[in-house]
Amino acid sequence: MELKFATSNPHKVSEANQVGRKYGIEFVQLEQDYPEIRDEDVRMVARAGAAYVFNIIREPVIVEDTGLFIEGLGGFPGSYSAFVFNKIENQGILRLMQGAGDRKAEFISAIGYCDIDGVQIFDGAVRGSIGTEITGTAGFGYDSIFIPDGHEKTFGENPKLKAEVSHRMKAFDKFCKFIAECWD
Amino acid sequence: MELKFATSNPHKVSEANQVGRKYGIEFVQLEQDYPEIRDEDVRMVARAGAAYVFNIIREPVIVEDTGLFIEGLGGFPGSYSAFVFNKIENQGILRLMQGAGDRKAEFISAIGYCDIDGVQIFDGAVRGSIGTEITGTAGFGYDSIFIPDGHEKTFGENPKLKAEVSHRMKAFDKFCKFIAECWD
């Protein structure tokens, strides 16, 4: 079964399909822009986005919003992660970390699914820390500076690990279980 | 005459009234939240915000959005200035500037005015550069690191200068001229 995934980021669709294929679900990228509200909770951003796109296309759709919340930076860049990455990249985050004592961080992913019954949210999180340098070229965004707890390499160095424990994988796992039951 | 100004920032109301009183206009703070859309143009953020608040209160209202656009950071923090300031403050911007060659910057203010006829936008800008340290305690936000072109002190050190040449003063001057004529 196919389901539309409104995003401009093909990496996200590819990661979603790593989970989806276990459930017989194929996520298809939909290049439909939507206004992202300025809320510090990625769940609220995903909720508003999914409702917006559904109102346009009138068929079931998901959007996904991810935030990297760094303790020592008061939760920055948080739900503004994509914008901040585009401007200052990982090098900028490492510069900011010079003044931040606490390198602990959390990645949170929220999927907003909207159909005629309204929006439902499925989230996933992974705790870790910000490395002291940029390492690894797999993945995208902050993957090359994020080291999940219990491990020594970044997601950028270890895409297999990312496929197993990442925030987005957890969120898609929850969502796919849900939608596979609906379609049963 | 009174006009409502939807903002959580009393500094902005105070600056608006520095201009308003020359035109017989009093801006009154309205603590009405509105969703800020994620657009990199402050004019678009102000446009959406003004329309949103007008739809709730059903009387003429303004909102104002300001961005600090730093050349060497690709326009960061731009229309996300308030969020970024709350998280990393001026110290964070100075850290990021270590890796940015170009310290040139522009402050842009956009006022969105909405009444029954729709939204109109009034903007103002001031060019300058980012200083190498935090100086001065007047004003708020990025005032203590922004040095307007042709001057040597930051807005934080020289509030009188800010009252004369700032982005927000220019935008409010345009707006007050307009509204004073409407009310004539």
Image (cartoon, coloured by chain):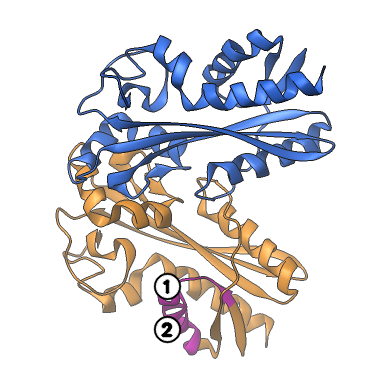
Chain colours: A orange, B blue
**Image quadrant assignment for residue B24:** top right
Q: Please, what is the dominant secondary structure of the magenta stretch?
A: helix
Confirm whether the magenta stretch covers residue A36.
no
**Residue A1 on image: x %, y %:** 61, 90
Residue underneath mark 1 = A169
Q: Residue at x 52, y 25 (%)?
A: B168
Q: Label 2's element?
A: helix
CA neighbours of label 1 inside 10 A, class few (<14), some (14 to 19), many (20+): many
Residue underneath mark 2 = A18
Q: Mark 2 vs mark 1: which is more N-terminal? A: 2
**Residue B97 on image: x %, y %:** 22, 40
Q: Chain of mark 2?
A: A
**Residue B154 on image: x %, y %:** 31, 20
Q: Residue at x 22, y 72 (%)?
A: A137
Please determine whether, in this image, residue B174 is positioned above or below residue A74: above
Please determine whether, in this image, residue B5 is positioned above or below residue A121: above
Q: Is residue A70 left or right of residue B169?
A: left
Q: Residue at x 37, y 27 (%)?
A: B142
Q: Chain of mark 1?
A: A
- Label 2 vs label 1: CA separation? 8 Å
**Residue A107 on image: x %, y %:** 38, 57
Q: Residue at x 25, y 19 (%)?
A: B152
Residue A58's label in the rendered image is none
**Foreground residue, B90 or A102?**
B90
Highlighted range, magenta? A5-22
Q: Label 1's element?
A: helix
Tell me the kind of residue under disc 2.
Gln
Camera sees residue B30: no
